[in-house]
Image: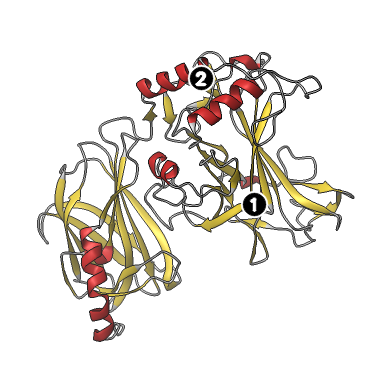
Amino acid sequence: MRRHPVPLYTLMVSALAVVLAAALSLTVAAPQAQAATVTVQAESYAAQSGVAWEATADTGGGQNAAFLADGDWMRFDNVDLGAAGRLTVSARTASAAGSGTVELRTAALTGPLLAVIPVSPTGGWQNWSTRTTEVTTHPVGAQTVFAVLRGATPGDFVNINWFSFADAGGAAAGWVPVDQAKWNAQLAEFRAMTPAAVPSGVVRVPEFNATCTYSHSKPDDPIVLPGLPGASHMHSFFGNRSTDAFSTTQSLLAHTPTSCTPAADLSAYWIPTLYEGDKAIEPEGMIVYYGSRLTDPSATVPFPQGFRMIAGSAKTQTPTPAGSPGQFWCAGAGGEIGRSADGNWPRCAPTAHLTHQLVFPDCWDGKNLDSPDHTSHVAFTYDGKCSGAYPVAIPNLSFVTSYPTSGSADGFRLASGMASSIHGDFFNAWDNAALGHRVKDCVNQKAKCNSAGTF
């Protein structure tokens, strides 16, 4: 039995929005990478049969194609499938009942099969899930793509928010080579800087910081899932206030509002959202430390613009009893007074707050701004130096995050799962000169600086 679509007058009011969406339906999400992700909004079809629209419930979701049943179809024109090679095809779907598939075909309704996206119940018509499949052989460049619905039972069985097509571009998927000309120019500017004189009495620790407050939350990840809004677990973002699934180096540099001091740091920082029961507990603050663990910190150079990396892993789901490495802890008077019932979280004194420090790798391969797993282009310092496949010393980044809670026997959970799944993402968008002077003055000279970059 088919659900009743929204009233005709509602669709007429939405018509202008859909026409505009059709004109803007293709969004390239990763211009720096050799890989590119093209996102096609489902409601921006050029033609259809049996399809209506409705508002997507989650913030920023826009419209979705709804009331889709067996035999319904949508046509999308000028979908760029990129170059020959591997293609990752995804769809954001929701289903309250039934199952089936979405056949993506090129050229015609009965044209060559591009991909098949499976559909199964997600628990509601607005409970969204992203389904992905890999394609090894496909037509290249701009194509007409048909989405043909195949339901296993009669009646509506799926809503669709968007499709995405991630093209490896003929290169090793996920590697983002640094622009050597730009990097060499940035290095030359850095090496020409005259270091500031260090006053007497300054603590001789190689360090400066960015002091940040919480900015916003989104189920987005522009490093792991670029161009796929809503495809991630919930993240708490710091720094650049524009950060979302479509963020690139250029977009971050173009949007100056930031929740960090100094204002010259337009970088994006994010971690999985913490929950106490069903309530999100957003951090009261994060200090992002830039330091060095090298025996000779004068070898450290700034991050190249557009550099990105991840520390920790959302896939780590192991218990964290007292004494576990990298665990959450209690900062403040009284410290830890016990553990949660499952033993994985500290309970803090009323005068202390839940805290965590996440440490990032500090040696770089000097070749790639990113890698397929977002960690293979970096490594941790070994024996006080960077060498071998990771010869370039970059600042030792760490997130120190404080939460306005002391916890309880019930403990917490992260959007990514257990406490051990804590991880953090860094997308560099510092002003080159501001970052360079801080590395030159503070890190290279082994002198402790504040967030203003002064002693």
Note whether 305 is above or below 13 in the view shown.
Answer: above
User: Please, what is the three-letter code of the amino acid marked with disc 2?
Assistant: Phe
Note whether 428 is above or below 97 in the view shown.
Answer: above
Residue 187 coordinates in the image, percent (x, y): 47, 19
Note whether 294 is above or below 71 in the view shown.
Answer: above
Image quadrant where one finds the N terminus: bottom left
Residue at disc 2, secondary structure: helix
What residue is disc 2 on? 190
Q: Residue at x 51, y 28 (%)?
A: 433
Q: Is residue 337 visible?
A: yes
| Quarter of the rendering containing residue 295 | top right
The colour scheme is secondary structure
| Quarter of the rendering containing residue 120 | bottom left
Q: Which residue is nearer to you in this view: 335 or 93?
A: 335
Residue 315 coordinates in the image, percent (x, y): 55, 45
Badge count:
2
Q: Residue at x 39, y 47 (%)?
A: 226
- Residue 83 placement, left or right of 328: left
Q: Residue at x 30, y 57 (%)?
A: 163
Gap in angstroms between the C-alphas marked 1 and 2 = 41 Å
Label 1 packing within 10 angstroms: few (<14), some (14-19), many (20+): some
Residue at disc 1, secondary structure: loop
> As drawn, which residue projects farthest toward the right?
334
Label 2 packing within 10 angstroms: few (<14), some (14-19), many (20+): some
Q: Is residue 234 visible?
A: no
Residue 143 coordinates in the image, percent (x, y): 14, 50
Residue 161 coordinates in the image, percent (x, y): 33, 64
User: Please, what is the three-letter code of the amino acid marked with disc 1?
Assistant: Met
What residue is disc 1 on? 418
